[in-house]
Image: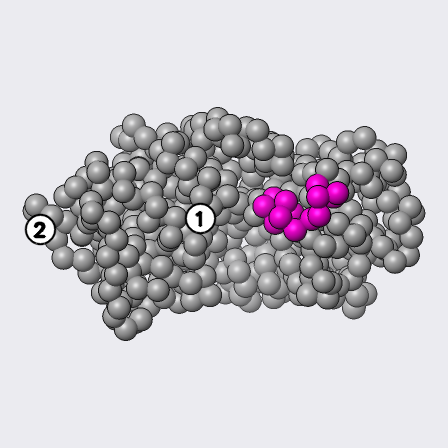
Amino acid sequence: MPPRTWRGSGVGWRFPAVLAALLCAGCGASSSAHRTLTVWAVGRESEIIAKLLPEFSRRHPDLEVRVQRLPWSAAHQMLLTAFAGDATPDLCQLGNSWLPEFAALGALEPLEERAARSAVVQPADYFPGIWDTNVLGGHLYGVPWYVDTRLLFYRRDLLAQAGFAAPPRTWAEWSGMLAAIKAQVGPERYSVLLPLNEFEPLLVLALQQPDPLLRDDGRFGNFESAGFRRALGFYREAFVRGWAPPVANTQISNVWDELGHGYYSFYISGPWNIAEFRQRLPPERQGSWMTAPMPGPDGPGASVAGGSSLVVFRRSRHREDAWLLLEFLSEPAVQRRFYELSGDLPPRRSSWDDPRLADNVYAHAFREQLERLRPSPKVPELERIVTEMRLVAERVVHGDLSVDEGAVDLDRTVDAILAKRRWMLARAAATP
């Protein structure tokens, strides 16, 4: 999609070649009286920014904001291409799992001094786990824009029929419920859906452990730790006992219909599925499902700190203007409007005062869960690592590896993935 140009009067459209538009979007001309700010956003969020900008333009009529939409499927490579070509934007939406890579490249402007002076960006108002995803090496490289996490979607009527009045708070309680539901629904149905093509359920269980997934500042895998082996063992048990079907989510009709049909009673997923279940389940099923925070090994559990942040690129010639827009998009009132338009959860506690969130019974569990978020390992290789976790977990489920063998295999593979990181850190340490 061509870049959108916002002025006080409305939206303008241009139609350059795709690559030329991408590279030129980072090169906005400026003058002392009228300045151009380039913003890159991914997917639908780019359209939503455009709906928020009229108020910003009213406050700053001397700033022209150009919004470039990047597709999720190509955004990562486009950003790397722009960095290599010295054509990065001023302000950008960046997925939290990508932030360590661009920080390591030196592409991002540290923001801690601006945040310390800001009357808008108040670190104490942000959920600590999501704020922490943006801090690397003592520097703040982004400000959370929206937060994504995973928790339980479940059939509360089937849970009640199995004799339980409330969702689980510990793994022991959850295991008891999974066993009871399986005994009730029989051999053709299951207690929980843990799709083998999704890494997130195992990642959530692993992040609940006291042992980190990586050790020595992210130089080596730590999968042979007692904590990860406990998480992998719990995950495997769900399949061995017949609580979970050993399938990918592509092997069922869809997750919404199958929850409605009672094919499974628990599913670990994110906030977007609130709208999906509301829309896709028939009216007679709307009172049968609910959300709940993740149970943990010994009490209420943590979950993954996902979502996107707003970053300022170091090569921007308009860093102060980019910070102005970042502050505007971080205002609680603007974040509430962003939630209304997108359904993306705000990362600030004060933004949750809005009745549209406070009165949403399905959002209550997310509000509780956001206080217990843990960042994934802050290394550029994270996506490769979680892919290997998923592949090894599938082999463990199918009986090709034991839990201990899977942990050893993961450490061996991840250590190889991190070899370049160890070399770079060693070289940096040796440089005066």
**Horizontal placement of 48 versus 388: left or right?**
left
Report the residue that reaches farthest toward the front: 283
Compute the Cα span from label 1 to label 2.
31 Å
Circle 2 sits in a helix, a strand or a loop, which is it? loop
Highlighted magenta segment, given as a residue range: 274-286
Assess disc 1: are there few (<14), some (14-19) or many (≥20) residues with their C-alpha within 10 Å of its C-alpha.
many
x and y, in percent, of residue 147 in the image: 49, 42
Which quarter of the rendering shows the N terminus? Answer: bottom left
Assess disc 2: are there few (<14), some (14-19) or many (≥20) residues with their C-alpha within 10 Å of its C-alpha.
few
Which quarter of the rendering shows the C terminus? Answer: bottom left
Q: What amino acid is at disc 2?
A: Ser
Q: What amino acid is at disc 1?
A: Ser
The secondary structure making up most of the magenta span is helix
x and y, in percent, of residue 2 in the image: 30, 64
Relative to 285, say whether 407 is above or below: below
- Among the 4 quarters of the image, the one containing residue 154: top right
Count of marks, rendered view: 2
Relative to 309, say whether 350 is above or below: above
x and y, in percent, of residue 218 in the image: 51, 53
Residue identifier under label 1: 308
Along the line of sight, the residue nearer the viewer: 165 or 354: 354
Q: Residue at x 21, y 36 (%)?
A: 59
Along the line of sight, the residue nearer the viewer: 389 or 339: 339
**Horizontal placement of 20 versus 243: left or right?**
left
Residue identifier under label 2: 31
**Horizontal placement of 264 versus 325: left or right?**
right
Mark closer to the chain start, 1 or 2:
2
Along the line of sight, the residue nearer the viewer: 371 or 3: 3
